């Protein structure tokens, strides 16, 4: 695979020596676009994924300024998963550079698969910020479809919280005696989504952190059995002048869904945060149904702050 992408820029493969320039270019794009995708890219870079040889390319303009880049991150799993990330400076957009770069990445991923994992199904994925359809439009052109949505929701706690009642169930703050039962339920809830089990040590380490709040975390109990949970802590931006809470994990046993349990759990968490003096609350939710999250947000009074879609395509 050659580094040439298209004629407007001068292209070459990226190497370790380009890391600082690429990082500065990303920061520049963040400032210009005010986008949340940089956070997604940072999470991918901090993971165990790697960049294959010849799968990172940059384009420079006539003034020798980096103006576009594309990096493909490989998750060596079965099926093979490759995430396509990149960006184009606003000055050089609307010249089909992004489309050509995306095509180059798709072709490069297929070529890498054929060389290193011949015959193995190839999953390709990319992220698009909702409300900015450029990436989605390009990806759709190449046969990608939306696989999942990720929402960052915020709730103004100056407004009263309505707590939904669910007949036959009790809702209590999380206690130490329930934490292991909740961990097992959490793993059960997220196993169908491909989530890795949370091990006891990492689970307990999080619960022992100062930022975790048992009094903002609730469980739903049927008889003496936990069937739902919502676990919360102080937001990263938490301070005494503008306290805010964040619900980081919640779930309901598959046999008890559709009864409003998650709404009741979240209502209790929000009320506990409000009673503690929090000014706002947040939560991150991922779902394959964009309509469902709108109903969830409307019921609890959340507003969407950021939203990202994961688009994917499988190549046999």
Image (cartoon, rainbow, N blue to C red):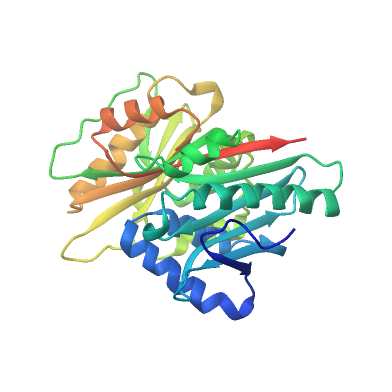
Would residue 198 appear left or right of 170 to someone viewing this image? right
Regarding residue 235, the answer to whether it shows in the image is no
Q: Is residue 35 above or below residue 9?
A: above
How many numbered marks, from 0 up? 0
Q: Nearer the viewer, residue 311 or 296?
A: 311
Q: Residue at x 26, y 29 (%)?
A: 298
Question: Residue at image x 62%, y 70%?
Answer: 14
The x and y percentages for residue 28 are 37, 68
Identify the residue shown where x is 41% and y is 49%: 94
Which one is nearer the viewer's eye here, 14 or 127? 14
Q: Position of residue 62 (x, y in %)?
A: 47, 72
In the picture, the quarter occupied by the N terminus is bottom right
- Please indicate whether residue 110 sits to the left or right of residue 71 in the image: right
The image position of residue 105, as x and y in percent, is 64, 52
Image side of residue 143 versus residue 38, left or right: right
Picture quadrant of residue 2: bottom right
Q: Quadrant of the C terminus?
A: top right
In the rendered view, tell whether residue 90 sits above or below residue 280.
below
The residue sitting at 60% across, 38% down in the picture is 312
Question: Considering only vertical position in the picture, is 171 above or below 55?
Answer: above
- Percent x, y of residue 137: 47, 37
The one nearer the camera, 182 or 81, is 81
- Residue 121 at least partly seen: yes
């Amino acid at each position: 695979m050659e580094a040439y992408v298209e004629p407007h820029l001068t292209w070459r493969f990226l190497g370790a020596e380009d890391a600082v320039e690429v990082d500065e270019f990303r920061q520049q794009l963040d400032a210009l676009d005010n986008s949340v995708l940089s956070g997604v890219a940072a999470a991918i870079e901090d993971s165990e994924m790697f960049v294959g040889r010849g799968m990172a390319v940059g384009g420079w303009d006539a003034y020798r300024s980096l103006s576009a880049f594309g990096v493909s991150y490989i998750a060596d799993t079965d099926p093979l998963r490759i995430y396509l990330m990149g960006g184009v400076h606003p000055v050089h957009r609307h010249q089909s550079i992004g489309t050509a770069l995306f095509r180059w990445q798709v072709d490069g991923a297929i070529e890498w698969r054929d060389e290193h994992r011949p015959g193995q199904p190839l999953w390709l994925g990319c992220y698009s910020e909702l409300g900015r359809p450029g990436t989605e439009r390009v990806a759709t052109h190449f046969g990608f479809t939306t696989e999942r949505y990720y929402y960052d929701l915020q709730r103004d706690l100056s407004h009263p919280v309505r707590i939904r009642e669910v007949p036959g169930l009790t809702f209590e703050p999380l206690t130490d005696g329930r934490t292991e039962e909740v961990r097992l339920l959490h793993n059960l809830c997220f196993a169908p989504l491909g989530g890795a089990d949370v091990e006891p040590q990492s689970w307990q380490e999080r619960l022992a952190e100062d930022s975790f709040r048992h009094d903002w975390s609730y469980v739903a109990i049927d008889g003496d059995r936990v069937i739902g949970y919502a676990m919360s802590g102080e937001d990263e931006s938490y301070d005494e002048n503008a306290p805010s809470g964040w619900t980081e994990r919640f779930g309901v046993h598959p046999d008890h869904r559709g009864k409003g349990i998650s709404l009741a759990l979240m209502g209790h968490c929000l009320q506990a945060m409000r009673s503690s003096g929090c000014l706002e609350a947040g939560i991150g939710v991922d779902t394959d149904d964009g309509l469902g999250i709108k109903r969830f947000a409307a019921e609890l009074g959340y507003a969407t702050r950021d939203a990202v879609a994961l688009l994917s395509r499988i190549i046999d």
